[in-house]
Image (tube, helix red, strand yellow):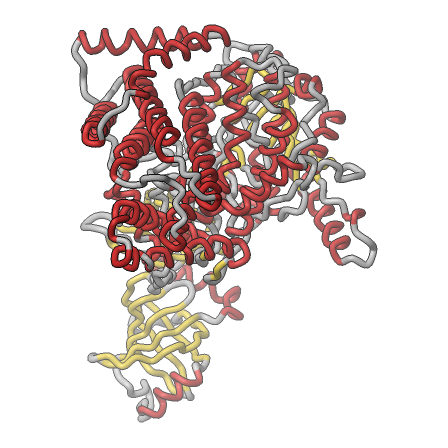
Amino acid sequence: MSSSSFRTPPTPKAHNFLTKFIAEIAPRFFDRALEKVGIKQFKWLVLLSLVISIPLIITPLEVWQQGVISVFLVVLGQIIVRAEEQESSIDISQYYHLFMVWLSIVTTMRYLYYRVSYTLNFDTWVNGIACGLLFAAELYAILTLVLAYFQTLKIKERQPISLNAIPEEEWYSVDIYIPTYNEDVDLVRKTALAAQACEYAPGKKTVYVLDDGRPERYKEDDPRREKFRGRREQLRQMCEELGCIHMTRDNNEHAKAGNINTAFRKTHGDLVMILDCDHIPSRQFLLHTVGFFYDPKVSFVQTPHWFYNPDPFERNLVTSGRIPVGNELFYKVLQKGNDFWNAAFFCGSAAIIRKDHALEVGGIAVETVTEDCHTALRLHGRGYKSVYYDKIMVAGLAPDTFNAYVGQQVRWARGMAQILRLENPLLNFKHKLSLGQRICYLSATSHFLYGYPRLVYAVAPTLFLLFGINSVQGLGIETLAYAVPHILLSLFTNHIIYKHVRFSFWNEIFEFVMSFQAGWVTLLALINPKMGSFNVTDKGVNISKRTFDWESMRGLVVVTALVVCSLLAVPYWLLLRPEDWQAVMVNTIWSGFNIILLSSALLVGFEQPQIRTAHRLQRRLAVMISVDNQTLMGETINISETGALVKLESWPNLPDEVQIEVHGDFTARATLTARVIRLSPVNDTETHLAIDFINITDDQRDALTLVIYSDVREWYSQNREYADQPFASLGFLATSLTRSLRDMKSTQTKKVRKQVQAHGQIYWDGHFFPGVATEIGVTGLRLELNSKRAVSSDKTLTQQDLQSMQKSKPLVGLLLSQEAAPASPNRFVAEITSVIETGNGLAIEMNFPEKFRERQSTKIKQLLQAL
């Protein structure tokens, strides 16, 4: 399915005065009222809404009447969604959203009232258990839906507060912490290098690498002790080279939180910027965030986490960037909704925190494994403010493997359940939280309880089709008349606010994938919140072949097998129990939908190989290519630390090695030597040039790191081009198998050399054979022989000679010149790699041997320039 299957947002339409007057006054009034609402006022507001809605919820109707109402509600919802998509005013769009929230809640409550009144099935103890589990799962889903509606009632957009009006000597001093444990030193170096490049007042910024990788924690005969000792020395040397401060401690208590708390006591900055060691900051970070702290009540400023490599969902389902990744919903919508209620969460990295506020609450929280959110809760509980600024200013690494992703999600699930159990944000009045803050924290800490409810949704129709266990009494068309508008209106409502960040049905995939792990770990955390420890997520792992993570997916494999078996049982139901056709129909549709979701979820555990050695970023950077005393201007289509794809507005005749200068968005530059891998014409004027960077020095690598990751005006994922279309999204999921099993091959490369006409002779077996060099590069050439006869003898190349050349790949002498009979031709040693008989004669492919490269490369480049 092509990316065109997902809709590009339409052009907004204009409005007349009356529409503008009616539609803008209400939302603005709502904004002002909602910002000032207290607990008592909010209760009265909710009560008033309930009183108005009660008749709509409880009024009984005949099945056909409910069916008509259902069709009307679905059509009305679609009309509103279409109108909102055409809307140019953010305020009016919000007005549509608020109306849909109310309509969805009323429809959901009507469905819930119907479920409680008519469909609970306790006629046998088996049916009663199944009914209770399904109903509990539905109650959890409805609670989650309503909490999310509350979180996103108002999306708060912020602009940075400029520091230009404040003298630099009055700027806050900032310490930048980069905690690290066992990560590769080269990974830490990129972040430290970019942290040093962050623009700020001179003398007001200090970078600390917090090295928690203690060799002393291992015994003398443990090989890990020597490994960590060597790593520590490498980090120390790196910090000395880059001008950072290398900080260690004598224990590893409380992992990352303890590491940061130790640094709090040893450093002196007013503010602390925290970066995970793989989170490379852009140079604008401090200038865009520090200004918020001139409000003395602000405790921390959080910015989005963004990952430049594909996570397991994007890579294993081969979405090619067409589907929003998992964390976009949180950072693009939920955090901005939380920010409206002064409840934005601290996320542990890509953030700045006021140190004296953090110390006031005892430093970074250590009682849970999600210390960041726990710390934010305590700061909000003291009455302090938070800021969420939605500008991507760090580039990090997502977990490369599904197993690493599971480990990360398990830690988050455990930590949130621990906070829910220990702090009880809704009812714990030790914290001075507003009602909005309590609801936002309840929503966050209860989110990871989805595991078992999601499994219940998969198992419920299976139990009926396999064993006749009926969890819904009277399941049939009447039930659909109540359930369909509840489901579709919630889908429409979420579409308005989530259409660019979470496509339809993908939330179910995320939940199915983690259902067993999240269900088990949250249950244990609720029982014993002190269980579990902090785990470091592996980053930078290269996957070379396809594998399936049976260990992580075995539970889901069993559930999928049961669902498949249940679908095979459908014909028997229709033959033996035709009177139950309505229940069979609904459960069959339900199971069919589940099998699409489950198969896609299983494919997330089917690891796809990583074709490239380094991840490509879709950055548009200006480049200058220098060759033969001329300069070509171009623009990168994508780039990594090992190569790039460059767009040129010409068809150049290039050698296989060129000099290239890559420009960042501001002032950073990197000058590199590049090998031309492929030259692909696009149209009459445009060419795509694929290059690999070669012979990169440490200084060049540092310069390239700053160009790619630090010198960034705006990351390309800041805004998405496509919007969700539910049917296209479901179709994309249904075709996941064909994409995941597609043979993945690296792009075939063709030798790129400068097209020339140079006179040449090869010296082989004591004889010279004349020809014309038609292609030549730094690494090799193509020589087309004029004839098979030697220059000054009767020797003629036989078929046996050609086979010998092809097989032995001999070293030969090579004479090259511009003229037919030069006084002093250029002399080289070359190696024959292949002999090709053409219609016009004989072509010989040759490489310049690597062992003679240093001696010959200067002469080769001079010849290339002259030809």
- Eyeballing the image, is 18 above or below 554? above
Q: Is residue 528 left or right of residue 505?
A: right
Instruction: Please name the residue shown 31% across and 91% down the image.
Output: 799
- Give the camera-side residue of 194 and 214: 214
- Give the camera-side residue of 488 and 56: 56
Instruction: Please name the residue shown 24% across and 21% down the image.
Output: 87
Instruction: Please name the residue shown 27% across and 51% down the image.
Output: 687
- Give the camera-side residue of 861 and 611: 611
Instruction: Please name the residue shown 57% across and 41% down the image.
Output: 278
Q: What x and y, as percent, mark residue 81?
A: 25, 27
Q: What x and y, as percent, mark residue 386?
A: 55, 18
From where the camera sits, is residue 60 visible? Answer: yes
- Give the camera-side residue of 556 and 643: 556
Residue at the extreme left of the image, as rendered: 16
Residue at the extreme right of the image, as rendered: 220
Q: Is residue 770 left or right of residue 378?
A: left
Q: Is residue 842 left or right of residue 307?
A: left
